[in-house]
Image (spheres, rainbow, N blue to C red):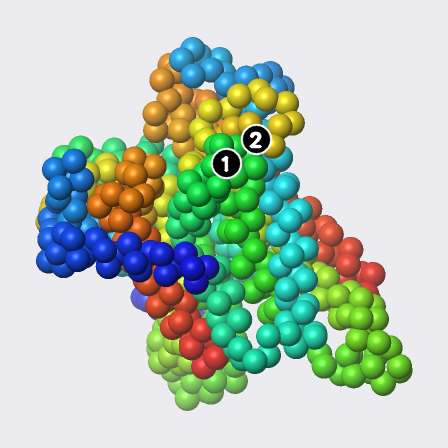
Amino acid sequence: MAGLTGWLVVDTLSLLSRVGVAPVLLGFHFQPQHGRFGLLPFVWGSVVVGVLALVVSVPLAVAWAVVATKRISGRASSAMTTAMTALVAIPSVVWGWWGLATVVPAVRGVLGGPGFGLVAAGVTVAIMVVPTVAALAAESLLAVPASLEDASRALGADEDTTLVAVTLTAARPGLTRAVLMGEARVLAETMAVAMVVGGQPVARLQIAWPGATLTTGLLTHLTALPPASAGGRAVATMALLLLVGTGWLARHLRRLGRAS
Amino acid sequence: MKTGRLTWVLYVLAGVAMAFPVFLVASLVRDGAGLLSWRFLTSESQPLAAGGGVGAELFNTVYVVGLALAASVPVGLAAAVLRREYGWGRRWGPSLEALADFGAGVPSVVVGFFAFVLLVGALGWPFSRGAGAAALFLLNLPWVAASSMVVLAAVPDSLREASLALGATPWDTVRRVVLPSAAPGLVGAATVGAARLLGESAALLFTTGVNAAGAGWSFWAPGATLAVHVFTVRTEGLAPDATAVSAAAALVLLAMVVVSLWLGRVVSRWFMRRSGLA
């Protein structure tokens, strides 16, 4: 593991020294056959997909968790929480299949363009991680002591005020953890993104149009570029960026896990 | 009590959230259920013509995932037991747990990349079921180790102390006290790992190869799993019924995931009843 990471670092440094730091980190195009190794398209794609997935999935997941744990009870409640954990296991290729059938045509219809693109990828992955985030959010909502909520109600607060001022506030570390776990899965997701993103390594502001992410870039160029070439080193750099990103998230998650 | 405005919004959002998985399964059934038959489950896939099945892919899935699980679960569990029950690697403090957590979060495409570079590139392995199983082993090992450590940590120390006070050796304590009371949780962790491996494809695309040759039991033969098959047929399939075949293959894959989760629950319950926990 350490050896492999070291090898990625060596490859990255040699790419940066040969091609230059700015053309790699700030280059808008990745065209190895033309000597252009800009990684910005992939970083940009991962950021856009990550932000879109966050914006779409968090309200849906938190609503699911709140309704399942605080608004209904009995058998319906336990069915809703069991469903979350079971749905986490739906393979990402299956979500990709559905994204191709439903999300891509929907994006084409609403925003124009080919449909394939960063928006389609962000929405598909957002819907995919909803059960993951909801399951963890439900866990942290269940851990809020009922006495706190009872106290709020006894003071005359209605259900909505109690939810916002007491329940969600008390569960905040756990909710943050749930959202970051979802985000880690989004950043790492490959297949569901690859099926709907369109696969064009160009950084552009029209996010409804085809793009690429770090994971799909790695997948596409993994075998296509020889390891010792500049292109192969660019692939190693993508893998390193992914490791750094997920490692940073894992570190934060550990810290949150200890705090809550 | 009057239902607040925010609560209504939450009901609507929760309804939307739960509608998507239903919608997903409905689309798969609409496009693929018509193809499901004994013939589909047993016949060879057809790259260009209609009427292909998933016989070879089904076999490869059981083969590759089974091999990876058979290797990663004992090794991961042993690592967790040595670390938690015998205190191995104490000198590194919590960094071993951190490493396992980190490893469990590494994107599967990066694991596939490492497996490709190491096995296919450096060691000259062919694209094969063996290389695929090795990639899945690397993917599952940190997960098994990390989750087993969490499960073992939840076993109360009083049980261990009681066993040792009665004169049991550390190994007897692990075997007869710690593992039986941790068994339901360990089975649960292994089940989640199994479900994840069944659906994995990013780590397999460049290790098992994508062509499913009906190659008997050979370890060195290429063999795409069902998840890889869903991806390739859906994105680059040339058969006229590619959409239906990939939907039907996805339904078979979902069924396998559901069955493995259900089996895990049954086994977990059995262990609970045996140790008198439920």
Is B277 displayed left or right of B122 in the figure? right
Residue A102 pos. (x, y %)? 32, 35
Disc 2 on helix, strand or loop? loop
In the image, taking residue A61 as reference, residue B190 lies left or right, namely right
- The answer to whether mark 1 and mark 2 are in CB contact below 8 A is yes
x and y, in percent, of residue A191 in the image: 37, 41
- Of A246 and B247, nearer the camera is A246
Q: Residue at x 34, y 25 (%)?
A: B236
Name the quadrant of the N terminus of chain B: bottom left
For residue B192, side relative to residue A121 (left or right): right
Chain of residue at mark 2: B
Residue B30 in sight: no
| Mark 1, residue position | B125
Locate the C terminus of chain B and report the quarter of the image it occupies.
bottom right
Mark 1 lies on a secondary structure that is loop
User: Disc 1: which chain?
Assistant: B
* Three-letter amino acid code at the position of disc 1: Trp
* Location of residue B196 with respect to A16 vertically, above or below: above
Determine the CA span between mark 1 and mark 2. 8 Å
Tag 2: amino acid: Trp
Residue B261's place in the image compared with B84, above or below, is above
Q: Nearer the viewer, residue A185 or A57?
A: A185
Q: Earlier in the sequence, mark 1 or mark 2?
A: 1
Residue at horizontal 55 percent and vertical 27 percent from the top: B221
What is the number of the mark on residue B220?
A: 2
Residue placed most toward the observer, A87 or B51: B51
